[in-house]
Image: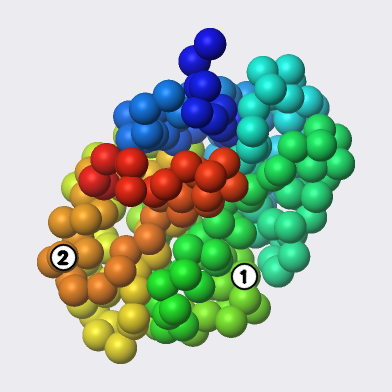
Amino acid sequence: MYGWRSRIGIIVPSSNTTMESEFWTYAPEEVSVHTSRLPLRRVTEKELVDMANEAEKCAKLLSDAKVDVIVYGCTTGSLIKRKGYDKEIEARINEATGIPAISTARAVVDALNEKEVKKIAVATPYTDEINQKEKDFLTENGFEVSEIKGLGIEDNIEIGKQPASIAYSLGKEVIRAHPEAEALFISCTNFRTFGIITALSRDVGRPVISSNQASLWCALKECGVPWELVREI
């Protein structure tokens, strides 16, 4: 059976074309990734909230594969109702399956706290409306957001089409405009970031955290698999 070291289950929006590939490409040897999908085409508040209503159903399907952890793989989808919504979704999944659950929003908070940073700059592919929801969530969790800048994209398929170089350029622009920021967060599980994080961090001289990076880190930590086994991202 694949995944004798650990099996990670992820729940992603139906239009997400990035998270699975980044997890599979960079996960350590014999850590397998198993996916279930929830309907979402556009990154709007309504679709994000509606999507979460089916979380337990998808989680139960993943539990049939005896996964060790279930990741709710949508950043804004796990913070759209602001502080506490991330943990509410985790609790619902855990109650439905008995399996530890991680929401991407909570993983990001944990990763930023692990770096011991408070002042952050944020780069996203989102619209201003969604960016404001994310800023509210991060502020309520104790972070000072120097700036949050997005690409203004609502169609999630279009987000997935953006090359990693776009995330690199946007992230570099945002962090350089705010030298007081202690770290950069690149948001969205459908925004390609693996492959540029290490280079970007070196170029700007500060930690860089992305949604998928934080989600994978948190999942491996839950499974007891060392992060050092992940390919350089």
At 81% from the left and 37% from the top, the residue drawn is 98
Disc 1, SS: helix
Q: Gap between marks 2 and 1, in whole Å?
A: 28 Å
At 71% from the left and 43% from the top, the residue drawn is 100
Does residue 72 sit above or below 198 in this rendering? above
- Image quarter of residue 25: top left
* Crowd rating for badge 1 (residues with CA inside 10 Å; few <14, some 14–19, many 20+): many
Q: Which residue is mark 1?
A: 137
Question: Is residue 7 among what the camera can see?
Answer: yes
Q: Furthest-left residue in view?
A: 203
Disc 2, SS: helix
Q: Which residue is mark 2?
A: 202
* Crowd rating for badge 2 (residues with CA inside 10 Å; few <14, some 14–19, many 20+): few
Where residue 67 sits: x, y (%)? 64, 27
Where residue 225 sits: x, y (%)? 47, 42
Side of 67 where 230 appears, left or right: left
Q: Furthest-bottom residue in view?
A: 180
At 19% from the left and 74% from the top, the residue drawn is 205
Q: Earlier in the sequence, mark 2 or mark 1?
A: 1
Amino acid marked by disc 1: Phe
Disc ID at residue 124: none
Which is nearer the eye, 19 or 158? Answer: 19
Where residue 132 sits: x, y (%)? 55, 69
Does residue 191 sit above or below 206 in this rendering? above
